[in-house]
Image (spheres, rainbow, N blue to C red):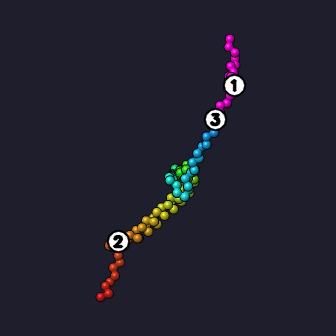
Amino acid sequence: MSKLPVRRTERAPRKVEQAKVEVIEPASSANPFVSFRYSYKEISASGGKARVKSRSARFEDGKLTSETFEGELDRSAYERMVGEAQHQLLAQTALLMNSLSWLLPFARKHRPDPD
């Protein structure tokens, strides 16, 4: 019969060469080779609640960072955000149209000739 439990014979530890490891310095933060940012936000409403989803990712200084957020809001907060966004969009559109209105022939004011 065999002897149980089987024991392993002891071995001497082997010697490892002490080679120096070259440390690579990170690129300077003043002039990064590659960096990017990505951001995504979604707001939707159904019933009396509004759902908010947000995701962002960025790669800076050799470090990748990612964040995710999800939550619920009251419907009135959603309606207030939508109203403010529409107001800002209309104000920017009006500013753009006013700056381009001088190009339109019917927008010029007719002045009577001084003759």
What residue is pinned by disc 1? 10
For the residues marked 1 and 2, what is the alpha-carbon distance in whole angstroms?
A: 93 Å
What residue is pinned by disc 3? 16
In the rendering, at what x and y percent does residue 86 appear? Answer: 48, 61
What residue is pinned by disc 2? 103
- Label the magenta part by its dominant secondary structure: loop
Check disc 2 and give the amino acid type: Leu
Residue at point 55%, 50% (across, down): 62
Residue at point 56%, 56% (across, down): 29
* Mark 2, secondary structure of its residue: helix
Report whether 81 appears left or right of 106. Answer: right
Given residues 114 and 13, the one toward you in this image is: 13
Check disc 3 and give the amino acid type: Val
Given residues 4 and 12, the one toward you in this image is: 12
Q: Which mark is residue 45?
A: none
First in sequence: mark 3 vs mark 2: 3
Q: Which residues are magenta?
A: 1-17
Of all residues, the one furthest to the bottom in this rendering is 115
Residue 70 visible at all? no
In the rendering, at what x and y percent does residue 42 appear? Answer: 51, 52
First in sequence: mark 3 vs mark 1: 1
To which quarter of the image does residue 107 belong?
bottom left
Q: Residues within 10 Å of mark 3 (few under 14, many from 20)?
A: few
| Mark in front: 3 vs 2 | 3
To which quarter of the image does residue 9 belong?
top right
In the rendering, at what x and y percent does residue 8 appear? Answer: 68, 22
Q: Residues within 10 Å of mark 1 (few under 14, many from 20)?
A: few
